[in-house]
Image (cartoon, rainbow, N blue to C red):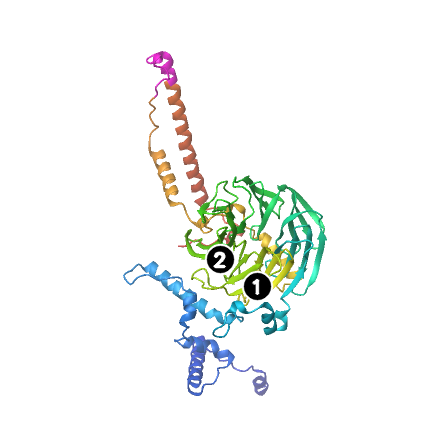
């Protein structure tokens, strides 16, 4: 029986302390780290985190990368405030982490380089197309549409689809990379501008009298008769607003998700045919014949900013992608660069060979200037002075519209002879955020992105010149309100120095009665105000009192002891 019990008895288990296991793992990692230092071998996957944590010194970051993400000079050594020093350390850590994450950006932007003694403006589009790969060379093409021009153009936010609109009514939408058409119609009347909406399923067309909405098959969906004689259109993607400027000097914002007119008012500045959107704060910038630029929000009927940019009438206006710089051109052949952060300048003042009738910024702040039938592209022309053009191209007829394609080294030019797709090396942003705008998104991804954008839609009341002002506290106004409440609770009813309108009533019974009525009215208002404040205090006290425990109280944040 004893032998049988010995066979049945389970093996003895020894309890290992958690501390001993961790210490043993640490010793193994230290030994592995020594092996790495001595032999140059790589660590196994399971011990990689331990070895990295053991190493006190990290690989230093190049100074050039840190300079790209630098946020300016820090605090002086004389500062001893602990909170400020902690904040400074956090900023330095953020700069270092941003520089280290550049390794995740697999693509890099390139530029056109020429030999000594040559100029990049001498390089033609044909030579560039012959030098690049087949896929990039296929992006350079021309569409000869002389019968219905001049053409207005517009790319989608992800840069995949192109919309063309001829002055004589011709409309075409297609995938310009694969050359697959979506629709092609003729509205048989004059049109002034075309604009994609939140995705490639719908677009707006400013026709002779009203604005029409079409789907990607060319079927008319809506006729917006409240938008009359529209000349220019722009779409605010985060607010789902279609902004329009008309020949009658009216400015309009239409919410396309609700079909509701958010704001529409006259600005009395003449014909509004120059308009650009500031992507930083979603304000509209308008150019006028007086040489001024005004910035508008749907919440105010007066301009937020009014700048005198030129002494002559404006011809074109453009704002770069991050909203830092604005370029303006006038009939005196001048092109000026302005700093929108400080609203001063000009930072740069250029004199062109002709009148710049079209301006456009790329993702990497290259500036395209259209003069007659000549396109010139300038590089590094905002912060520094550009001595000469980066690229130059000539089209058959005068230019009507220009736009850089997002995330591509492509400049689209609409002219009287049709459309031209130019290759501009280094113009596009090589690394895109697929959650923001994905050029290769599927149908399912597009649907999910549309639902997410609608859920995260920003209300038009938040469009201000400084988008961060909405999160701040108006300290002076708050102090004034608190002081007024305190004085009202502790003070007495104000004394009324009543004087009758006519001196004849002075000392009469009527004057005494009127004075008594006024005093009672003021006293009554005072008592009501004190009661309102005391009721607010009671409500706050009741809300702060302990309530009976509920099942849902476990989801509330715990009170700090």
Residue 485 image offset from top left, x and y in percent: 37, 37
Q: Nearer the viewer, residue 5 or 89?
A: 89
Label annotation for residue 393: 1
Q: CA distance from mark 1 to mark 2?
A: 15 Å
Q: Residues within 10 Å of mark 2 (few under 14, many from 20)?
A: some
Q: Is residue 328 left or right of residue 70?
A: right
Instruction: Find residue 152 and report its image quarter.
Output: bottom right
Picture coordinates of residue 42, whole percent (x, y): 48, 83
User: Element under label 1?
Assistant: strand
- In magenta stretch: residue 506: yes
- Whether 59 is drawn above or below 471: the answer is below
Which residue occupies 50% across, 78% down?
46
Residue 549 in the image: above or below residue 445: above
Residue 487 x/y as whole percent: 34, 35
Q: Quick one: quadrant of the N terminus?
A: bottom right
Residue of label 2: 352
Q: Is residue 348 left or right of residue 253?
A: left
Q: Secondary structure at mark 2?
A: loop
Q: Which residues are magenta?
A: 498-514
- Residue 183 picture location, percent across and down: 71, 56
Question: Magenta stretch containing residue 215, yes or no?
Answer: no
Asked whether residue 175 is in view, the answer is no
Q: Quadrant of the C terminus?
A: bottom left
Left or right: 53 with respect to 315? left
Q: Residue furthest front?
A: 353
Q: Quadrant of residue 33?
A: bottom left
The residue at the far left in this view is 78
């Amino acid at each position: 029986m004893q032998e049988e019990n010995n066979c049945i008895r389970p093996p003895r288990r020894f309890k290992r302390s958690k501390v001993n296991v961790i210490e043993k793992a640490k010793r193994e990692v230290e030994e592995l780290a020594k092996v790495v230092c001595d032999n140059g071998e790589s660590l196994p996957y399971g011990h990689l985190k331990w070895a990295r944590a053991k190493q006190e010194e990290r690989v230093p970051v190049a100074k050039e990368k840190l300079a790209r993400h630098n946020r300016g000079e820090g605090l002086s050594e004389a500062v001893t405030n602990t909170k400020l020093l902690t904040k400074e350390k956090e900023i330095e850590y953020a700069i270092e982490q941003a520089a280290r994450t550049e390794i995740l950006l697999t693509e890099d932007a390139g530029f056109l380089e020429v030999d000594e003694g040559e100029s990049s403006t001498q390089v033609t589009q044909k030579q560039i197309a012959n030098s690049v790969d087949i896929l990039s060379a296929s992006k350079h093409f021309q569409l000869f549409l002389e019968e219905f021009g001049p053409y207005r153009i517009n790319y989608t936010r992800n840069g995949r689809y192109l919309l063309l609109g001829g002055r004589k009514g011709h409309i075409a939408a297609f995938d310009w990379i694969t050359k697959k058409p979506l629709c092609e119609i003729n509205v048989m009347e004059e049109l002034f501008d075309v604009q994609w909406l939140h995705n490639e399923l719908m677009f707006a067309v400013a026709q002779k009298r009203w604005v029409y909405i079409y789907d990607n098959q060319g079927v008319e969906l809506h006729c917006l008769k409240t938008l009359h004689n529209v000349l220019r259109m722009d779409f605010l993607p985060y607010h789902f607003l279609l902004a329009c400027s008309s020949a009658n000097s009216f400015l309009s914002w239409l919410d396309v998700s609700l079909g509701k007119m958010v704001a529409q008012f006259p600005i009395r500045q003449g014909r509004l045919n120059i308009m650009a959107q500031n992507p930083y704060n979603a304000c509209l910038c308008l150019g006028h014949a007086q040489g001024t630029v005004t910035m508008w929000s749907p919440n105010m009927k007066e301009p937020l900013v009014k700048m005198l940019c030129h002494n002559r009438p404006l011809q074109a206006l453009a704002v770069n992608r991050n909203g830092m710089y604005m370029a303006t051109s006038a009939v005196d052949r001048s092109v000026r660069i302005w700093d929108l952060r400080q609203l001063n300048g000009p930072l740069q003042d250029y004199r062109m060979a002709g009148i710049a009738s079209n301006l456009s910024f790329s993702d990497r702040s290259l500036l395209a200037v259209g003069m007659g039938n000549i396109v010139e592209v300038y590089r590094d022309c905002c912060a520094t002075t550009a001595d000469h053009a980066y690229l130059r191209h000539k089209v058959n007829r005068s230019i009507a519209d220009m736009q850089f394609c997002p995330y591509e080294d492509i400049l689209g030019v609409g002219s009287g002879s049709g459309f031209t797709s130019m290759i501009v090396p280094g113009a596009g942003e090589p690394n895109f955020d697929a959650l923001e705008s994905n050029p290769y998104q599927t149908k399912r991804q597009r649907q999910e992105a549309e639902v997410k954008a609608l859920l995260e839609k920003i209300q038009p009341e938040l469009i201000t010149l400084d988008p961060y002002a909405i999160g701040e506290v108006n300290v002076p106004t708050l102090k004034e309100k608190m002081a007024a409440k305190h004085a009202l609770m502790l003070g007495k009813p104000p004394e009324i120095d009543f004087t009758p309108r006519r001196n004849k009533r002075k000392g009469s019974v009527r004057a005494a009665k009127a004075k008594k009525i006024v005093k009672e009215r003021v006293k009554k208002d005072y008592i009501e105000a004190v009661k309102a404040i005391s009721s607010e205090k009671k409500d706050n006290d009741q809300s702060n009192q302990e309530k009976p425990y509920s099942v849902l109280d476990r989801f509330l944040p715990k009170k700090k002891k």
